[in-house]
Amino acid sequence: MKFFIDTANLSQIREANEMGVLDGVTTNPSLMAKEGIKGVENCKKHYVDICNIVDGDVSAEVISTDYEGMIKEGEELAKLHSNIVVKVPCIADGIKAIKYFTGKGIRTNCTLVFSPGQALLAAKAGATYVSPFVGRLDDITSDGIELVGKIVDMYSFYGFQTQVLAASIRTTQHIIQCIEVGADVATCPLSAIKGLLNHPLTDIGLAKFMEDYKKVNG
Ligand code: G3P
């Protein structure tokens, strides 16, 4: 399973990248706003900065919600760097735009997906990635991981090439559950990725190794 980091924060992206296990980055308008990035040109510069840190796919989301606007924005974003994947919302004009981008060889991430039917449309339009939002479904006492599993099974049954990118991942446990249902990618906050390292027996074992080493070597 590939790991993307879900943030627009450059220092967190650098830290995750330096661990050597990062495969890409996802951003969205909320994450860009959180970093105080405003204006089209600043956003574009920020995407290029991210692409210069990570050697992997970087999702950059369109702000337009109409077909023509999405096409214009997406084409501009795709020209910024070869690693850019144009992120498009799962609405009717978005599906149409994904189909257009697919025909032009521009890679896409269909975002805000909450049902298998939406995921089917994204795949039929040729999306490179589909992003089911795990945490937001859990928030309304639905089951986000169950949706990820359903999409993985559907794509496998019909032979779709679209990769299932589990998004709105909030916890380390979500990452483990994504592995269990066969997600292709999980995009996670840095804290959830680092949480994978935590195990008390590792800490106890390491302390004992160091203690025994010092007993003999001083
Ligand atoms: O990748 C989508 C993600 O950023 C949404 O996460 O925590 O706002 O639901 P969240």
Image: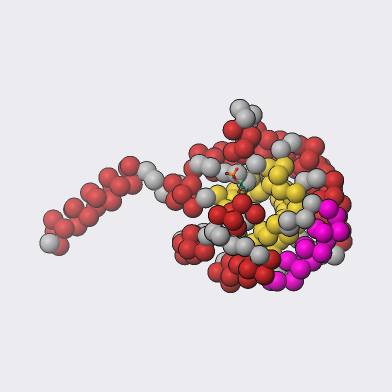
x, y percent for residue 89: 75, 49
Q: As drawn, is 179 to the left or to the right of 75?
A: left
**Residue 56 visible within the image:** no
Residue 45 magenta: no
x, y percent for residue 63: 73, 56
Which residue is pictured at 62% across the width and 56% down the height? 27
Comparing 29 with 143, the one in front is 29
Which residue is pictured at 82% across the width and 64% down the height? 72
Residue 68 magenta: yes
x, y percent for residue 186: 60, 48
**Residue 45 visible within the image:** yes
Quadrant of residue 102 within the rendered picture: bottom right
Q: As drawn, is 2 to the left or to the right of 117?
A: left
* Magenta stretch: helix, strand or loop mostly: helix
Which residue is pictured at 14% across the width and 59% down the height? 216
In the displayed structure, 41 sits above or below 172; it is: below
* Tally of numbered tags: 0
Give the quarter of the figure containing the C terminus.
bottom left
Residue located farthest toward the front when viewing the structure as drawn: 39
Magenta segment: 66-81
x, y percent for residue 195: 44, 46
In the displayed structure, 111 sits above or below 150; it is: below
Which residue is pictured at 49% across the width and 43% down the height? 172
